[in-house]
Amino acid sequence: MKPSPVKLIIGAIFPGEGILIEAKVRLEKKFGPLDFQSPLTPFNHTEYYKKEMGPDLKRQFLSFQRLISPRKLAEIKLYTNRLEKRLSRVRNSPSRTINLDPGYISAAKLVLATCKDYAHRIYLGKGVFAEVTLHFQQGTFRPRPWTFPDYRSKGYIQSFNAVREIYLRQLR
C-alpha cells in the first residue's frame, strides 16, 4: 500500500534574518515554493543552541506547496544537515549558523526527523529517526508526553493548524 502524501515543514532556528533568507532560497530550489511562513518568534524555550549560535535566536516554520512521500523524510533530514554545514562555510563560521528541522504534517499528526535516538523514536535509516511530536484531536494539534516545550506553545500550534488546513485543501 502506498502512503498518502504529506506536507513538508521545516523549522528554522537562526540568529539573524540574513541566514534565513539564504536558507529559504536553497530550500525552495530543492523543494519548490513556500505556501506558509509562520511569524518570526523569539526562540527562548531552551538555551541548547545559545553556545553554538549565540543569543537572541529566532524561530520560523516553513511549509512547501509540493506534497511529499513520508518515505522521503530521512533523505530530507540528511539534506538539511548538509545545508546547515554549507551555510556555515559560506559565512566562514566554525559553528552552525542555522538549525533546520524537517518534518511533515498529515491529517492526524506532526512528525519530526532527528538524528538523536530516544525511547519514543523510530529508526528510518541512515542515522535518522522520526517521532510523532503532535497529534490532531478535537479540532487542534495536541502534544505528546515527550513534546518539546516550544512545540506545545499556542503560537506554534496555531501555525501547525494553519498548515494542516492548507494540506487538507490540497487533498480535496
Image (cartoon, helix red, strand yellow):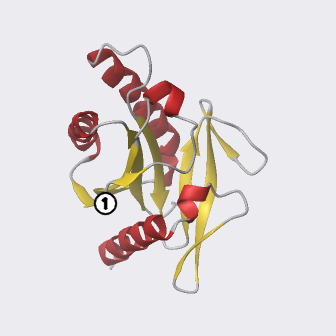
Callout count? 1
Residue 60 screen position, x and y as percent: 36, 52
Query: Which residue is outermost to the bottom?
Result: 138
Q: Give the residue at x 53% y 65%.
A: 153
Residue 131 screen position, x and y as percent: 63, 52
Kindly state the secondary structure of the residue where label 1 is placed. loop
Quadrant (top left/top right/bottom left/bottom right) for the C terminus: bottom left
Residue indicated by mark 1: 39
- Viewer-proximal residue among 10 and 68: 10
Above or below, comparing residue 123 to residue 54 in the picture = below
Above or below, comparing residue 137 to residue 2 in the picture = below
Above or below, comparing residue 121 to residue 16 in the picture = below
Residue 123 screen position, x and y as percent: 68, 41
Residue 1 seen in render: no
Q: Give the residue at x 55% y 51%.
A: 45
- Viewer-proximal residue among 49 and 88: 49
**Res 97 → quadrant:** top left
Residue type, label 1 = Pro
Q: Is residue 119 left or right of residue 123?
A: right
Residue 4 screen position, x and y as percent: 47, 65
- Viewer-proximal residue among 37 and 43: 43
Residue 112 seen in render: yes
Quadrant (top left/top right/bottom left/bottom right) for the N terminus: bottom right
Q: Give the residue at x 48% y 69%.
A: 157
Crowd class of label 1 (few under 14; some 14 to 19; many from 20; radius 10 Å)? some
Q: Is residue 41 left or right of residue 27?
A: right
**Res 18 → quadrant:** top left
